[in-house]
Image (cartoon, grey):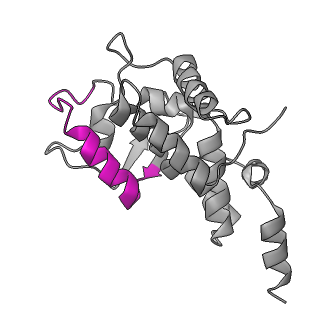
Amino acid sequence: MRQAQTLNEAQLRRVIQYCRSRRHPTRDETIILFSFYAGLRAKEIAALTRGDVFDDTGAVRTQFTLSPEQSKGGKTRTVYVNQRLRRALADYAAGLNLSDPNRALFESQKGGHFSANTMCQLFLDIYKAVGLKDASSHSGRRTYITRLANKGVGVRLLAELAGHSHISTTQRYIDVNAEQLSEAVELL
């Protein structure tokens, strides 16, 4: 099975710029950012509720827990929200009614939760529109894990952040390129 493309910073900027031209710009940009800055799967993004990411006062949480129903493998997982994603969520919240914490964080055209398949299709549509033919809903997740690995985060910590039970699964996500190999030998 072919792996999803990891994106560089310029490609991610192109994706974000394109999202801003869509019918639901803030929603779509925030979905993309969840993938790239929290490493969530499309299924997990689709299952998020407003109460998962916003507290009772409407403030963005610094971390939240995915329930077994929301995550892959039926296990709970803590998701840590970095500053860039928190800022995007605060902007996104400006257009939301936060009074019902069980309401879908990202509503589909029909007003409810996206299905996992519909969320995957949203990613594919966005990536296709910007000319990224090998990118998929997993591209943000692979990029998230690869970027953290490139910054020296250990594979055990990466596995925990990704919700993987085995580090061998996490290792398959880490993309290796010529620039990294060149930098590695310069460490000697």
**What is the x, y in percent for residue 146?**
68, 57
Return the residue nearer the eye: 31 or 57. Answer: 31
Residue 176 placement, left or right of 152: right
Can you say which quadrant of the picture contains the N terminus? top right
Range drawn in magenta: 79-102
Residue 6 in magenta?
A: no
**What is the x, y in percent for residue 18?**
48, 36
Return the residue nearer the eye: 183 or 148. Answer: 183
Q: Is residue 102 visible to us here? A: yes
Residue 142 placement, left or right of 104: right
Q: Given the current orientation, which residue lies at the most extreme bottom position? A: 188
The residue drawn where x is 55% and y is 30% is: 126
> Relative to 35, does residue 116 appear above or below in the rendering?
above
Residue 98 in magenta?
A: yes
Return the residue nearer the eye: 83 or 61. Answer: 83
Q: Is residue 39 visible to us here? A: no
**What is the x, y in percent for residue 71?**
53, 34
Q: Given the current orientation, which residue lies at the most extreme top position? A: 110
**What is the x, y in percent for residue 150?**
68, 67
The residue drawn where x is 84% and y is 70% is: 181
Can you say which quadrant of the picture contains the C terminus? bottom right
The residue drawn where x is 17% and y is 43% is: 58
> Relative to 22, does residue 92 appear above or below in the rendering?
below
Q: Classify residue 10 by image quadrant.
A: bottom right
The residue drawn where x is 40% and y is 40% is: 30
